[in-house]
Amino acid sequence: MAELKLHRINQHIARLRDDVVRPRARVSEASSSLIRYMKTTKDPLLPSLWGTVAKEEDPFHQPDANKGCCIVS
């Protein structure tokens, strides 16, 4: 029982050591980086900010289902 408890404590200490050496970024640096990215990267889902996107450039455009085939009625 004591060995199992010691093993769990050692695992917890190892996780804490991993957390200590993980690189950190300040919130102000991360937020300014995010704002800079959002201002410079065109997003087709925000037409009010970037304007409409041509169908050829839109990665979310669905091709026409009727294009290239004929319909018989």
Image: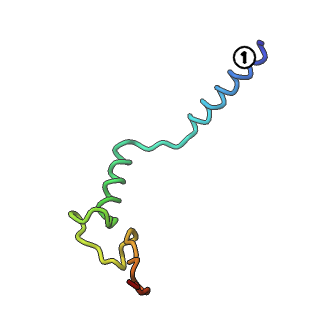
Vertical placement of residue 18 versus 64, above or below: above
Residue 27, picture quadrant? top left
Residue 41, picture quadrant? bottom left
Vertical placement of residue 18 versus 33, above or below: above
Give the class, few, some or many, for how many residues have Cα within 10 Å of label 1's Cα (few <14, many ≥20).
few
Task: Identify the coloring.
Answer: rainbow
Vertical placement of residue 31 versus 59, above or below: above
Q: Measuring 56% from the left and 34% from the top, which residue is drawn there?
A: 20
Left or right of 19? Residue 36 is left
Q: Nearer the viewer, residue 6 or 23?
A: 6
The quarter of the image holding the N terminus is top right
Q: Nearer the viewer, residue 73 or 49?
A: 73
Secondary element at image label 1: helix
Vertical placement of residue 49 versus 35, above or below: below
Q: Measuring 31% from the left and 63% from the top, which residue is drawn there?
A: 45
Residue 65, picture quadrant? bottom left
Q: Can you name the residue that lies furthest to the front here? A: 73
Amino acid residing under circle 1: Lys
The quarter of the image holding the C terminus is bottom left
Left or right of 51? Residue 29 is right
Q: What residue is disc 1 on?
A: 5
Provide residue 31's location: percent of width, then percent of height. 34, 48
Provide residue 5's location: percent of width, then percent of height. 72, 16
Q: Measuring 34% from the left and 44% from the top, which residue is drawn there?
A: 28
Provide residue 6's location: percent of width, then percent of height. 73, 18
Provide residue 13's location: percent of width, then percent of height. 65, 26
Left or right of 46? Residue 15 is right
Q: Can you name the residue that lies furthest to the left here? A: 48
Total residue callouts: 1
Left or right of 12? Residue 23 is left
